[in-house]
Image (cartoon, helix red, strand yellow):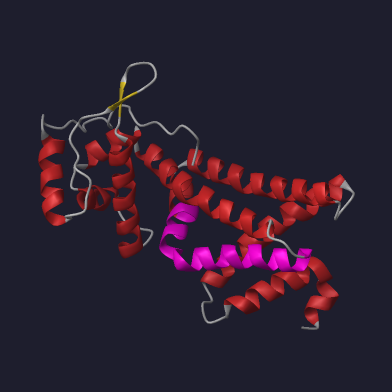
Amino acid sequence: MIDGVRDEGSAPHGGGDAPGEEATAGANASARHPHATPSGRAAATTPSGRAGRDPRRRRALLEAADRIILREGPEASMAAIASEAGISKPILYRHFGDKSGLYQALAERHTRALMDNVRAAFLRPGDIRTRSRAAIDTYLAAIAANRHLYRFLVHRASAEDTATHSAMGTVIRGLGGEIADILLREGLLPDPVRVHIWSHATVGMVQAAGEWWLDHPDVPRETVTDGIVALLLDGLPEATRR
């Protein structure tokens, strides 16, 4: 999930492909998936004049990855993703530079969208309790609806690729900083140090509680949201009385 993820680069060693393989595979994919974007090697031109990968093709490959992960779970293989896209694994890697590039592109695609939605929920009109509840509930609803994809990005991709882990951590920490800035602008908490402590602790708490909740799906989402809000805004003594 890094801005400017590479679209080009060499395939892994030993990953060469025969001329025309992607076009042939793309035709086969179209037969299997009528709505798939045609592959081919036609590419857009970058500002430097160098040929770059077609962004529509890139998007289609990421959508294929989404489908496989949602269907097979976080252990979905790169080979399965390539097969879903109707191409070989070396060609899949070529579009993203390598496996790390694919991981980062998936993280960019989903994590930033999730953080944008959480931020928007926190910026809604209302008091701090209403807004905190909306932001927390937005986050929990999103990870519950895409639990396979969430586990793929947070556990598998982050464990396998340090760049993905670092990039995702940067986005999450950035959200904590943005919440702190919002609170300071609004004058809700005047002490900048305490604002940043509260904001970053909140983000970490919600993420950890969400991880626990995914393993305990019998607990209603509303119960988790209410518990976090009570702890954040009322403190532990008040939260224990609920």
The correct choice, above or below, for 73 with respect to 167 in the image is below
Q: Quadrant of the C terminus?
A: bottom right
Q: Is residue 137 magenta?
A: yes
Identify the residue shown where x is 70% and y is 75%.
227
| Image quadrant where residue 122 sits | bottom right
The correct choice, above or below, for 86 with respect to 68 in the image is above
Q: Position of residue 178 (x, y in %)?
A: 70, 46
Q: Is residue 106 magenta?
A: no
Nearer to us in this view, 209 or 28 = 28
69 displayed left or right of 31: right
| Image quadrant where residue 88 sits | top left
204 displayed left or right of 103: right
Q: Position of residue 40 (x, y in %)?
A: 17, 35
Q: Position of residue 46 (x, y in %)?
A: 36, 22
Identify the residue shown where x is 33% and y is 28%.
8
Q: Residue furthest front?
A: 125
Q: Position of residue 195 (x, y in %)?
A: 82, 51
Q: Main secondary structure of the magenta part?
A: helix
Nearer to us in this view, 76 or 202 = 202
Q: Which residues are magenta?
A: 127-155
